[in-house]
Amino acid sequence: MSQSEINAEWQPAARPLNSKDLKTLVLSSLGGTLEFYDFVIYALYIDTIVKPLFLPHTLSPLTLDLFAWGIFAAGYLVRPVGGIIMAHFGDKVGRKKMFTLSVSMMALPTFIIGILPTYETIGIFAPLLLLVMRMLQGAAIGGEMPGAWVFIAEHVPKQRYGFGVGTLTSGITGGILLGFIVTIIIDLCFSHQNILDYAWRIPFIVGGIFGIISVYLRRFLSETPIFKELAARKAIEKNIPVISVLKNHKTACLIVALLTWSLSTAIMVGILITPGRIVGGMYHFANLDWRIGGCIAALTLTIGCVISGWLEDKLGTTKTVIITWGGLAVMSIYFYSILSPTISLTKLYLTWAIFGLFIGAIAMTPIIGTRTFPPAIRYSGLSFSYNLAYALFSAITPTLTIYLLSPEHLLGQYSYLGAGIYISFVALIAVAVGFYPLAKKGWSNKPNNK
């Protein structure tokens, strides 16, 4: 263990939550909302825009699915690269600088997607350019998510740590809600042909512009007290931070990786794939109906993240993961079991809302993950573990989910429960992780706690 690890606590001391903390939370959450909106808006337009406008019409439906979701997954595959590079400098020169850089890197490719020519105009270059823009977005979000969590964890007082990180996660996932709202507005204001002709570009162009605004807003944030302390004591990690992570903090990496598997599956399957691919595609609900349902789930997700953080502060980690992740394990099976083409919209929306609330369990991933690493290598440790796991599991999840939903494959007549079984499985893994001592108490400066 390096001297820098010994010389600093993992979070600020106990004190009241003040106005400066609230400003930091609001500005950080707003930027995270806009950045995550930029990233997920692609997923919401896969079936209605990406397939008809950016891919050859001669491809089979299955091949179209694989290509469209493959471009989406590419954004996840490059996350570790962007995350590791930005985290390295975040541990070396400061959290704030990288926090601002990540949102800058997201705004530009999002805007460019909004002005890209389609396949009809430039042929194969259309999907290739879209792929490049998705990869740039992925590199940006790879630095944004861990950086945001570390930034807030090192600002908020000890007794409000769960609330702070949970609220930030709520703000970030609010980007999904914003994406659903914008696509609903587009559907209501434009005909299908007008959307295909030009209106689909509006969400991307607006997202890019708002991303630039969030770059400006982050100028008003201050560096974290813990990084300032490390700098004042000349305790900045002298070696390459990620090397120290791999050498001394393997258990912490495993904890974050497993929790990230749970988070990525809950978000990708429960929030992004379920509306269009399952409710719309399998059960043939109208676009507007499944978009409203997805919007409701995204709204209750943001509420659930705050509740998870509040429970962490009040009850501790073990009880909270039982309530949140354990509740999601049960609710996911129930939600997918009641889906049918004849279910009433009232019942669908109500059940979907409760399902989304329990997906708020994902806030426990950064709450636990951020505190498992010491300050000097925290950004690198969290970023490496989180992004590598997210890239791996997000790359296989769409294909695995489609496989599980197919009656000809593993689950047979129970294939309609495939998505629910997958979410339930990873939720139970998260519950088990919550019992591990390092997950419950976080890193300490005791030499045997690695």
Image: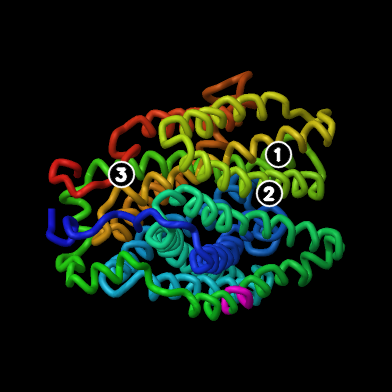
Residue on which disc 3 sits = 442
Relative horizontal placement of residue 184, taking residue 95 as reference (left or right): right
Q: Are marks 3 and 2 in contact (CB under 8 Å)?
A: no
Q: Amino acid at mark 3?
A: Gly
Residue 375, quarter of the rendered image: bottom left
Per the rendered image, the range of residues in magenta is 208-212
Which residue occupies 63% across, 46% down? 303
Q: Earlier in the sequence, mark 3 or mark 2?
A: 2
Q: Badge 2: how crowded within 10 Å, few (<14), some, or many (20+)?
A: many
Q: Is residue 56 above or below residue 297?
A: below
Q: Which residue is drawn at the image coordinates 83% and 28% (left, top)? A: 342
Separation (CA) of disc 3 from disc 1: 32 Å
Q: Is 292 on the left-hand or right-hand side of 371?
A: right
Residue that label 1 marks: 353
The kind of residue tagged 1 is Ala
Question: Depth check: 67 or 175 in front?
Answer: 175
Q: Are marks 2 and 1 in contact (CB under 8 Å)?
A: yes
Mark 1 closeness class: few <14, some 14–19, many ≥20 residues within 10 Å: many
The alpha-carbon separation of the residues under discs 3 and 2 comes to 30 Å
Which sits in the foreground, 129 or 159? 159
Q: Is residue 436 left or right of residue 395?
A: left
Dividing the picture into quadrants, the one containing residue 62 is: top right
Residue type of the residue flagged with mark 2: Leu
Q: In this rendering, would 336 be left or right of 444? A: right
Q: In which quadrant will I find the C terminus?
A: top left
Read off the residue under disc 2: 299
- The x and y percentages for residue 284 are 78, 38
Residue 133, x across and y down, in percent: 52, 69
Residue 443, given in percent of the width and then of the height, sits at 26, 47
Q: Nearer the viewer, mark 3 or mark 2?
A: 3
